[in-house]
Image: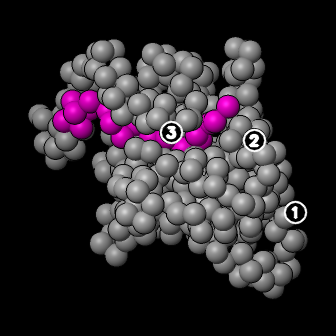
Amino acid sequence: MIIDCHGHYTTAPKSLEQWRTRQIAGIQDSAQMPRVSELKISDDELRESIESNQLRLMRERGSDLTIFSPRASFMAHHIGDFQVSSTWAAICNELCYRVSQLFPDNFVPAAMLPQSPGVDPATCIPELEKCVKEYGNVGINLNPDPSGGHWTSPPLSDKSWYPIYEKMVELDIPAMIHVSTSCNNCFHTTGAHYLNADTTAFMQCLTSDLFTDFPTLKFLIPHGGGAVPYHWGRFRGLAQELKKPLLQDHLLNNIFFDTCVYHQPGIDLLNTVIPVKNVLFASEMIGAVRGIDPETGHYYDDTKRYIEASSILSEQDKFQIYEGNARRVFPRLDAALSAKGR
């Protein structure tokens, strides 16, 4: 089975964005604030948005199942207060749940959290629990920088995050560490802020003893881990200077990377440096990079092609990347698939 661990609902019906525009306007003028009941999206609209986009490409490219979460750049936790984020997260999570019910063989949901700058992360727990227990979510997206590129939150190792981690461990779910839109002009959202955050999150874990406190906590760092695989020697050296254990013991029982790396040399580097057990297949389509590579004639984000073309990976390695690792990192996904005989 080809399991794509990184999918976002980037093709939701236009009415979702229109409702969000009204919500943002309502922050300044309460008279414009829409009610949740005013957003009406039919099952047929959801089907059309998926069948003509994600599902069509999954079939063309040969993937079977996508872990599906709300559009990352639309999380925009820096907009409004906790109530604004809470309402928006609930709407987006419900839509992903509905998609998973309409296409149960192809999509399984993961949740965004109603984070808000300066607000205790523990306030996210009710939405997290609802999504896991009622919607069957198998993971969450955790934003280490809800300020939108200004990094006003404490590092992921700070104890203010611990209530989230305790709940993750209790429910046996991992978190994809994923920021949202950058509102800092220094950082392009998908080209800089995302990759900065991937690298920063890894370093925050490296300099801490977070996984001593939470030995079963699992983080998935997307976009191939940002700069991490390319600079693996730097990180090994820094860990050594900080008197930390070897990275294979310090972090690699808890941190995993996806294959959202959009060229063959990048995928080859990832799979040369990072152990196969720590790599999960993903494409992030339809996402940040949607064009066709003129050097190959194929879409940049058709990442299965890179795995198939690898001269490094054995067939067993490919099985682990495509399916085995995802079922191990997402135990609730494995349980749901096993219950269906898959």
Q: Which amino acid does label 3 sit on?
A: Arg
User: What residue type is disc 1 on?
Assistant: Asp
Residue 13 is inside the magenta segment? yes
Mark number displayed over residue 171: none
**Distance between the alpha carbons at the discs numbered 3 and 2:** 17 Å
Report which residue position mark 2 lands on.
319
Q: In this picture, which residue range is highlighted in magenta?
A: 1-19
Task: Give the tally of numbered discs.
Answer: 3
Residue 6 % position (x, y): 54, 44
Task: Check the image and report above or below for 58 versus 252.
Answer: above
- Say what secondary structure mark 3 lies in: helix
Q: Is residue 166 visible?
A: no
Residue 85 occupies quadrant: top left
Q: Quadrant of the N terminus?
A: top right
Closer to the N terminus: mark 3 or mark 2? 3
Left or right: 252 as drawn, with respect to 306: right
Mark 2: give few (<14), some (14-19) or many (20+) Cα within 10 Å. some
Residue at 68% across, 58% down:
310
Picture coordinates of residue 262, whole percent (x, y): 50, 60
What's the residue at 87%, 63% (across, down)?
249
| Residue carrying label 3 | 61
Residue closer to the observer: 161 or 56: 56
Q: In which quarter of the image is residue 22?
A: top left
Tag 3: Cα neighbours inside 10 Å, few (<14), some, or many (≥20)? few
Q: Residue at x 34, y 76 (%)?
A: 186
Q: Is mark 1 on a helix, strand or loop?
A: helix
